[in-house]
Image (tube, rainbow, N blue to C red):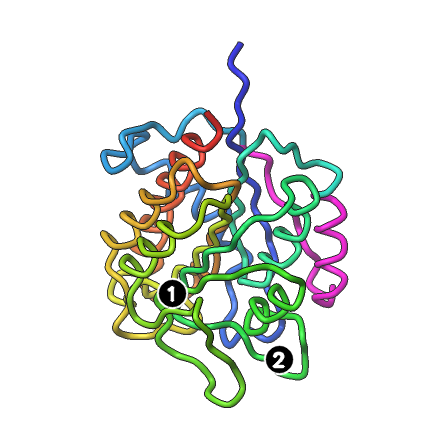
Amino acid sequence: MEIVRTKLLGIQYEGKENFLGGTRIAPAYIRWALESIEDYSPYLDGFYKPYKDLGDFYAKWDWPASKFSRILESCLRKKLDPRDRMLFLGGDHFITYPIVRALRSVHGDFIIFQLDAHLDRRDQFEGSKFNHATVMRRLEEDGFRVYTFGYRAFAKGLEYTHDRTFPFDVLEPMKATLREISSPIYLTLDVDVLDPSIMPSVTNPEGGGASFKEILEAINLLKGRLIGADLVEFSPVIGDHYKSGVNSAILVRELLVALKYSAS
């Protein structure tokens, strides 16, 4: 009997700081869209099935971010197996915070790759220090080494950059970084890194983004090196949700295939 080591968990959470809502229902929409695409990836030469769907973690509407984070991290610490390769479906980008803190307890140190139109490094946003706009700052304060690729918008004077933040381009700085590091990697993929013509259903679209092919190639570069990944910030209630949902599902397929390479 085959032991399935690639697993998927939806995280139904979005903070009150979101400009527009809807990301908490993305896991269900993506699962539905996943049924409309082929099982086989011609890009990574693999099937995304079999994988184990663990269902959803549901965060109540009245939970503050600190409570959500504490509960999810505690639950994951009890359930995670270091042999598994997990894909998490958000939800807004704050889900990455409790996820990677829990993963560190079973995997030890690893590096975070962030694909995102935004830096997410404010100290606080809308009066809160824990939300989608502050998440990478909080992780770096916790000692995580975060590389950001493809950002093209940030709050100057409120956010910082450093030698691991790369504007506009994804592939070339990622290739250069991969040549320099040997550490395992966690990938957090905010779908607004894509150009809005490809992914219109996001809360904060930013023109001039990455092409779909670039993101597929970026995932391909990471196969065999991932300990886990998340896909966040797709909102099925905004814009052309069907196109965005199917494209999100294709990215989920590619991530599951890439994680299978890492688990084998």
Q: What are the residue bounds of the magenta stretch?
A: 53-76
Residue at image coords 76%, 61%: 67
Q: Does the magenta stretch include residue 58?
A: yes
Q: In which quarter of the image is residue 258?
A: top left
- Inspect the image, locate mark 1, and give the three-letter code of the amino acid beneath it: Asp
Please state which of residues 115 and 35 is positioned toward the viewer in this rendering.
115
Residue at image coords 56%, 46%: 10
Seen as rendered, the residue at the extreme bottom is: 157
- Inspect the image, locate mark 2, and give the three-letter code of the amino acid beneath it: Asp
Vertical position of residue 22 compared to residue 55: above or below:
below
Q: How far apart are marks 1 and 2 (CA)?
A: 21 Å
Asked if disc 1 and disc 2 are in contact, CB closer than 8 Å, the reply is no
Q: Which dot marks residue 235?
A: none
**Dot 2 surroundings within 10 Å: few (below 14), some, or many (20 or more)?**
some
Vertical position of residue 110 compared to residue 81: above or below:
below
**Dot 1 surroundings within 10 Å: few (below 14), some, or many (20 or more)?**
many
Please state which of residues 151 and 252 is positioned toward the viewer in this rendering.
151
Q: Which residue is under mark 1? A: 192
Please state which of residues 9 and 170 is positioned toward the viewer in this rendering.
170
Q: Which residue is under mark 2? A: 123
Q: In the image, is 155 to the left or to the right of 136? A: left
Seen as rendered, the residue at the extreme front is: 180
